[in-house]
Amino acid sequence: MISKVVANYLISMARTVENSVGHALDALMCPNLERAAALFEPGVLVEPRVNEMEMQIDDHAVRMLRTDCSMMKKSGALWRRRENCQRLEAHRRSRVNISERVISLAGMNVMETPQELDPMSGAVRGMLGRSLGALIFRNIVLAGEVLESDDVVDRYRDQIFEHLLAG
């Protein structure tokens, strides 16, 4: 029973992180600092909630190990869920990195957004959704799609970098 609780917290955390990263990407796409700040704020507000969910997952995992000796045999699955939680935390940190980049770019008064940024943002959103789906549902097909989309995102990044270097 507690295992379902952990799984539900993990799914809730994944959805929250995905939504938060989406807000950060929306802010990145806005050249207007005030509008970007308004889109960025909801992401900041969920930070404590994500941390709370991570602690609740940890608490439930420890409680499961303490109360059910037979759970020791199943602890591999429990630790895999904990690793999933840590991966979600890494996605959350990506949101923070994107948000810091938004603030940096806004301070530079960049007038023209590289045209590759919009399709790159879409590719990142799709990659994140597939990544979380692969993580939660242990879906190998989605995991393979994530690896493939990583190359696409890298190509967009390289194109944007070349565009910025060209002036």
Image (cartoon, rainbow, N blue to C red):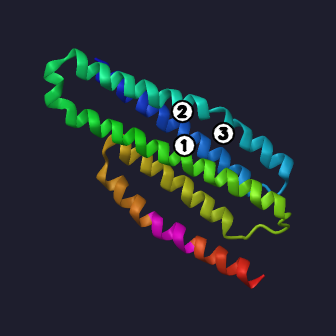
**Residue 118 seen by the camera:** yes
Q: Say if the magenta span includes residue 154.
A: yes
Identify the mark at residue 18; answer none if there is no mark: 1
Q: Looking at the image, is mark 2 or mark 3 earlier in the sequence?
A: 3
Residue 25 in picture, x, y percent from top left: 66, 52
Q: Looking at the image, is mark 3 or mark 1 earlier in the sequence?
A: 1
The quadrant where residue 80 appears: top left
Find out whether the residues at labels 1 and 2 contact each other: C-beta distance under 8 Å. no
Instruction: Judge depth for marks 3 and 1 and give the one in front.
Output: 3
Rendered-image quadrant of the C terminus: bottom right
Q: Say if the magenta span includes residue 75.
A: no
Rendered-image quadrant of the N terminus: top left
The quadrant where residue 72 appears: top left
Placement of 121 over or under 129, stated as above or below: below
Circle 1: residue type: Glu
- Asked which secondary structure carries label 2, the reply is helix
Circle 3: residue type: Gly
Give the alpha-carbon distance from disc 1 to disc 2, as whole Å: 11 Å
Q: Residue at x 56, y 53 (%)?
A: 125
Residue 42 in picture, x, y percent from top left: 70, 36
Q: Which residues are drawn in magenta?
A: 149-155
Q: Which residue is label 3 attached to?
A: 43
Q: Which residue is label 2 attached to?
A: 50
